[in-house]
Amino acid sequence: MPPAAPSVARSLGGREGGRLGRRRRLPNPSMSPRRTLPRPLSLCLCLWLATVVARGDAQSGSCRDKKNCKVVFSQQELRKRLTPLQYHVTQEKGTESAFEGEYTHHKDPGIYKCVVCGTPLFKSESKFDSGSGWPSFHDVISSDAITFTDDFSYGMHRVETSCSQCGAHLGHIFDDGPRPTGKRYCINSASLSFSPAGGPGAEGGPAPGGRAEL
């Protein structure tokens, strides 16, 4: 016996309702959880971006990059005249290995000069053993011999030292040196040459081939 019309309607309604109930509901964008990068990855990304920006700032500080150095050498000449390590340190802001530099334990009296242009930088009297592995000085030979530039590379703040005459990278300066200055000029041996006290060239000056910029 066929069911009455209301029964058929209720049956169909029940089946349709079940199908609707089983249908997947579309996600509500306003209720979806926000997707974020893992915290370590976010931190690494931020540090990387800061380093990239800071390197750009640091590289614009020396006179070499601004093309207003008082003494200018062609890169071709420097590659011929300097050793690969000297070129890497002075022209590419490199760092020599600790305790392996020529002047790390050097104690002879005289003048330490820029290896690129010969500008006098430090007197031997200001040299001291810092235990850092690089030649260290507590004072510069004259206030205008070195240029200071903020360096934010590698995710930290340091102050780079460069030759004010040719822009050669020398090293960095720190506030943990001895009296009377309290400064520590941490300098790469590869950035230096040495003139013994009383010897020829003790006063220094532009190296041969340099072009003076007035």
Image (spheres, rainbow, N blue to C red):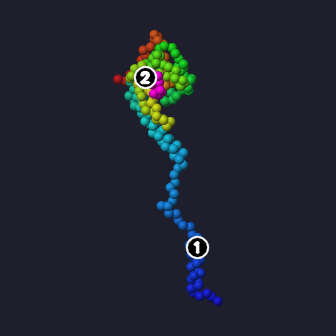
Which x, y percent locates residue 154?
A: 50, 36
Q: Nearer the viewer, residue 193 or 183?
A: 183
- The magenta region covers 168-183
Residue receiving disc 2? 181
Task: Judge whether residue 30 can be spotted in this image.
Answer: yes
User: Residue 27: percent from the left, percent from the top?
Assistant: 52, 63
Tags 1 and 2 in contact by the CB under 8 Å rule?
A: no
At numbered mark 1, what does the secondary structure look like: helix, strand or loop? helix
> Which residue is the site of mark 1?
19
Residue 118 showing in the rendered view = no
- The three-letter amino acid code for the residue at tag 2 is Thr
Q: Residue furthest right?
A: 1
Number of residues whose C-alpha sits closer than 10 Å to that of mark 1, classed few (under 14), some (14–19) or many (20 or more): few
Q: Please state the horizontal and vertical placement of residue 77, each as a whole percent of the image.
A: 47, 24
Residue type highlighted by circle 1: Arg
Q: Residue at x 42, y 31 (%)?
A: 149
**Residue lying at 52% horizontally and 43% vertically, measured from the top left:** 44
Crowding around mark 2 (Cα neighbors within 10 Å: few <14, some 14 to 19, many 20+) is few
- Furthest toward the front, the residue is 179
- Residue 129, x across and y down, in percent: 52, 21
Quarter of the N terminus within the rendering: bottom right
Q: Rounded to the nearest whole Å, what is the CA distance between mark 1 and mark 2?
A: 85 Å
Could you tell which of marks 1 and 2 lies nearer the N-terminus? 1
Q: Is residue 105 magenta?
A: no
Assign a secondary structure to mark 2.
loop
Image vertical order of residue 42 relative to residue 160, above or below: below
Q: Nearer the viewer, mark 1 or mark 2?
A: 2
> Residue shown at 51%/52% (left/top)?
36
Q: Does the magenta stretch mainly form a helix, a strand or a loop? A: loop
Q: Quadrant of residue 70?
A: top left
